Amino acid sequence: MRPDVATLSRTALAAALFTSLAAGPGPAAASAQSGATMDVVEPFKVGTFEIDGEPRVALVLRDALVVDIGEANRALERNPAYPAVPAPADMLDLIGRYEYGVRPRLYEIVNHLVANGMIDGSARAGFIHELGDVRTLPPIMYPGKIMNAAVNFYSHVNETGTEEERAEARRQRRENRGVPYLFLKPSRGAVIGNNDEVVIPWGRDRTDWEVELGAVIGRAAKYVSATEAQDYVFGYTVTLDISDRGGRPPGGNPLTSDWFVGKGHDTFAPMGPWIVPKEFYGDPMENLRQTLSVGGEQMQEARAGDMIHTLWELIEYGSSIITLFPGDVINNGTSGGVGMGTAVRGEQRFLQPGDLIEASIDGIGTLTIPVVGEDEPAGGTGARLPPVRTYRRR
């Protein structure tokens, strides 16, 4: 007797189910099981804060309240309705496990706090702190690597040239974009957080500002296409690429360009004040507006339309050279209005001790950084980087 169609269908379905179970869930299935489609009643940001003398990873609600994730998770798990999910040990752990169980748990924490009236008033949970009562630390302590895009805004092309020279340089760049230019920025030692001080190195009197959007990588990425790059991003933060325009002294090595001198000093990579997960920010190539002021005077303002290469092209390029890992940061470059440029103000202006930098990105927040000077160090044998004044004139 020949089996009927219904019997064949049931047999095929059973075989497929057995094969699927035997193979186990892959990354896509694991993401689905993690509750990727769960809704959250309030958007949040994530950051690192000093709480009770220790760095703690936390949620930021309403840009005003800091929720200690570890304590909130322990409180939630006292309810038997919520299974045990290990709280992230730090931001790198949170980013790496966000799609594998951490995101739905954070959503559950926020939903539970709101539903039970634990955010406002006298019923506020003890693990929720006012932002002003805790110290804001760099959100990631510390990225494995930081990659910055050099001259990636048309308004930043040839900022020191005449109006005609700038126009011609930008016209040529539009006709020949080429591939992006990325350089490595040091991480530990250079990365500082909101309200931390940028220290102008002793004798380096041409210290400059650059506000940038930092894209925080959320998944390991190698040879990622620009069309898929957004899938590999965890979120976005405000960054500064503080720069030493003094260059290296003449003599000795014939090379004149020195990116380590220009970009690598202590405190030259401010980051923060927190990270906005990408689901709460949207597409930066549509939403981006980044601004910077010094001493209350606006120096920079730009939108994504001024970028030469898109953020996604930067990720494609960077991942074609080295594997990107969760917690790595790619900065999108800066616009016209830097201190060394003359196009905006008509003259150069560099950072001075006592200045206050305020760098903002709409939808993320403001990074506030005071500027101080460094005292002359003692000792040395002559191998140190010398003061700019010893080999350059204004």
Image (cartoon, rainbow, N blue to C red):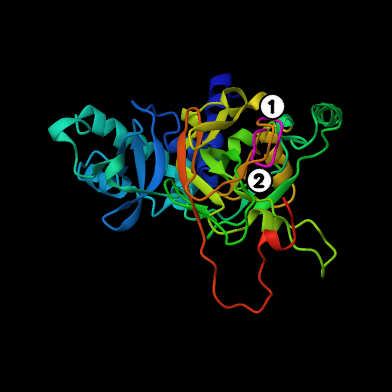
- Magenta run includes residue 337: yes
Residue 152: x percent and y percent?
71, 36
At x 66%, y 63%, the residue is 387
At x 35%, y 27%, the residue is 42
Quadrant position of residue 390: bottom right
Judging by the rendered image, the residue that carries numbered circle 2 is: 148
At x 44%, y 37%, the residue is 33
Which residue occupies the foreground of this view, 14 or 88? 88
* Left or right: 165, with 364 as reference point: right
Which residue occupies the foreground of this view, 130 or 380? 380
Mark 2 lies on a secondary structure that is: strand
- Res 19 visible: no
Classified by dominant secondary structure, the portion drawn in magenta counts as: loop
At x 69%, y 27%, the residue is 306
* Left or right: 365, with 52 as reference point: right
Query: Which residues are the magenta region?
Result: 336-344
Crowding near the residue tagged with mark 1, few <14, some 14–19, many ≥20 C-alpha atoms within 10 Å: some
Q: What's under tag 1, amino acid-wise?
A: Asp
Quadrant position of residue 255: bottom right
Quadrant position of residue 8: top right
Q: Quadrant of the N terminus?
A: top right
Which residue occupies the foreground of this view, 284 or 175? 175
Judging by the rendered image, the residue that carries numbered circle 1 is: 306
